[in-house]
Image (cartoon, helix red, strand yellow):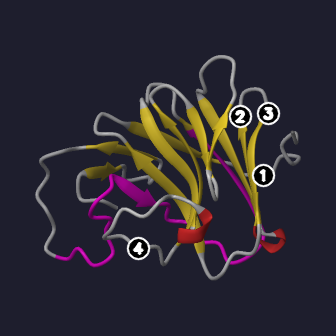
């Protein structure tokens, strides 16, 4: 995690905490972004979790390779090991090969992320309505983890599912 992020002891909440003491070992931390990888690591199987983004102004979330560049600020797209959607304060985007605007009526409060590692699929949906937001397809290489990127005033809460729902509705 970026040293300016505070992670709850249960690993279910991340929030910006600017001004914290910077650790001496920065080797596995994000330096240029307020980002964190989830503690879960996936190399196979199906997984689902939800993220509350209700009061968060700007964010990106989805999954990333465990081995992503933590020092620079690469585009958060599949070519760089990120499968994410984002919100810039006004619009929602799928950070795919090209940035694609996601058309929505209203504001997202809870996002569901469904990963089928073996099928190379990430499906992101509105968890309240199960409406499809974006799908990424392709092969994963190596270990992937949940990924969260926050704004300076941001906070996200993660709700791990104990059972997999039926795959989200497709577009």
Q: CA distance from mark 3 to mark 2?
A: 5 Å
Dots 3, 2 in contact, CB < 8 A: yes
**Residue position for label 3:** 130
Q: Nearer the viewer, residue 151 or 97?
A: 97
Question: Relative to 95, does residue 73 appear above or below in the rendering?
Answer: below
* Residue 159 x, y percent position in the rendering: 59, 44
**Residue position for label 1:** 163
Q: Residue at position x 39%, y 37% from top?
A: 155
Q: CA distance from mark 4 to mark 2?
A: 29 Å
Q: CA distance from mark 1 to mark 2?
A: 14 Å
- 34 falls in the magenta region: yes
**Residue position for label 4:** 69
**Of the numbered discs in the image, which one, if any, rests on residue 152?**
none
Q: Secondary structure at mark 2?
A: loop
Q: Quadrant of the C terminus?
A: top right
User: Which is more foreground, mark 1 or mark 2?
Assistant: 2
- Per the picture, the main secondary structure of the magenta-coloured stretch is loop
Magenta part of the protein: which range? 25-51
**Residue position for label 2:** 127
Image side of residue 148 versus residue 72, left or right: right
Q: CA distance from mark 3 to mark 1?
A: 16 Å
User: Which is more foreground, mark 3 or mark 1?
Assistant: 3
- 8 falls in the magenta region: no
Q: CA distance from mark 3 to mark 4?
A: 32 Å
């Amino acid at each position: 995690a970026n040293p300016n992020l505070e992670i709850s002891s249960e690993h279910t909440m991340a929030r910006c905490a600017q001004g914290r003491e910077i650790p001496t070992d920065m080797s596995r931390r994000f330096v240029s972004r307020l980002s964190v990888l989830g503690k879960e690591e996936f190399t196979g199987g199906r997984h689902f979790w939800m993220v509350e983004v209700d009061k968060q102004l700007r964010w990106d979330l989805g999954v990333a390779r465990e081995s992503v560049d933590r020092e620079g600020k690469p585009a958060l797209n599949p070519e760089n090991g990120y499968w994410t959607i984002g919100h810039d304060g006004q619009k929602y985007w799928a950070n795919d090969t090209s940035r694609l605007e996601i058309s929505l009526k209203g504001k997202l409060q809870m996002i569901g992320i469904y990963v089928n590692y073996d099928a190379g699929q990430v499906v992101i949906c509105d968890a309240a309505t199960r409406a499809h937001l974006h799908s990424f397809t392709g092969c994963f290489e190596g270990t992937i983890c949940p990924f969260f990127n926050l704004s300076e005033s941001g906070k996200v809460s993660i709700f791990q599912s104990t059972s997999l729902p039926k795959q989200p509705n497709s577009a």
